[in-house]
Image (spheres, rainbow, N blue to C red):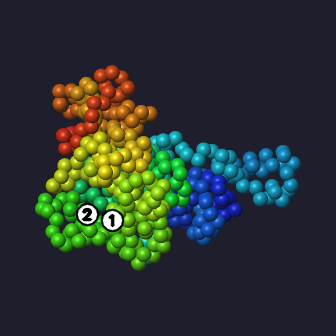
Amino acid sequence: MPVIQFPATALRLGHPVPFALRDKSGHLLIPRGTVLESEAQRLQLIERGLYIDEVDSGQFKKALAGKVDSMLRQNMLLGQIAQAQPDASDCGPTTAPPTKRVGDPIGAWNGLLLRASSLLHEPTQTDFDSRIQRLDLEALELLDADPDAALLMLIHSTTSDVHQYSVTHALLVAAVCELAARHLQVWPADWRASLRRAALTMNIAMTTLQDHLAKQDAPLNPRQRDVIDHHAERAATQMRALGVSDELWLHAVEHHHASPPGPLAQLPAMLQLARLIQRADIFAARLSPRKLRQALPATAAAKAAYLDENKQADEAGAAIIKALGIYPPGSYVRLASSEVAVVLRRGRRANEPRVASIVSRTGTPLGEPAVRDTRIKGHEITGGVAPHEVMVRINLERLIQLS
């Protein structure tokens, strides 16, 4: 895409950036609305070179002209006017309306899955850290553009296709962690980047094995068991060798199967992140079919994430339920009418999402998905449905349109 250089002086600490910032090649550095927390972060971005989409350039110039005009009318000093930079609010809202920013969310997510697969299956020494960060920020931009469409895509892929299991699982866990972390308001905002990147890379030491196990119809052999038992610490060691230096990220990976239950505030930061990753990992795994195990309904997956090892409510698991509801987009539900529907969007209440029926009350597939209002009597949700019970080929593009 055509890009125009963006002035470094327009980057201000504590303020959301007015546009998505890219490098000279057009690769996303940080999404629009990101708040710069430190001078080190600002300088790191400046060193990479700052550019914005060509279409945003005119809006920036217009906002700058408006700022200068406003300062002139306030009789401000010429030195202050010379240093004028527009605020994010001068350039329009920092978040666009859902479904408007990505014209082809399915194509965008599929492209991201392909690049993630290449990176996670064949990590190399060259720019691994920066490539993971770029992948993470592109995923965040897609997630922020339309969280429900993202969940619909990722959960549908998780429940229906075992061929890209490891990468789809990583992206889904990262998305779930990001959305859940927004409900943990005591967490510093800068933890979330480390959290997402840890979720993306937690299984990097067993990526190929993960794909194989999803299709394996025999019990684990001793070598496979050893890889699984030690993959967390091996992943952290491998990433250190690849140049990753973010200790919060690395320790969250290393402990993502070893963070204990209990109040999060009683744990160090790395174990708090690890705990959320662990619960999101459990949630996503329960949604995924294997040769030796059928996928569970979303309600069962949510329960598994919510209840800890002692069958008590888990704080991290509760944040996941608050973020996704008990019927997240992409999952299947049964309605009071006996129809089977796929969830399109979360609702204001956890049990009232927007859905589209795909199987009639008599059990026959509907020729066209039919949107149902679950707030209306007769269309209420009576429970979740496991993916293997839905013998209908899903037209994902059509569902995105209906959502």
Instruction: Give residue 86's position: percent from left, percent from top.
Output: 70, 52
Could you tell me which residue is drawn at 61 percent across and 68 percent down? 40
* Mark 1, other Cα within 10 Å: few <14 / some 14–19 / many ≥20: many
User: How many numbered marks, from 0 up?
Assistant: 2
Quadrant in which residue 37 is drawn: bottom right
- Is there any visible trace of residue 169 in the rendered image? yes
User: Is the C-beta separation of discs 2 and 1 under 8 Å?
Assistant: yes
Left-right relation of 127 to 208 = right
Towards the viewer: 73 or 39: 39
Q: Residue at x 35, y 53 (%)?
A: 279
Badge 1 element: loop
Q: Which residue matches tag 2?
A: 210
Q: Which amino acid is tagged 1?
A: Asn
Q: CA distance from mark 2 to mark 1?
A: 8 Å
Specify the label residue 203 is tagged with. Answer: 1
Q: Would residue 55 be found to the left or right of residue 235 on screen?
A: right
Q: Locate residue 33, reporting x and y percent.
A: 58, 51
Q: Residues within 10 Å of mark 2 (few under 14, many from 20)?
A: many
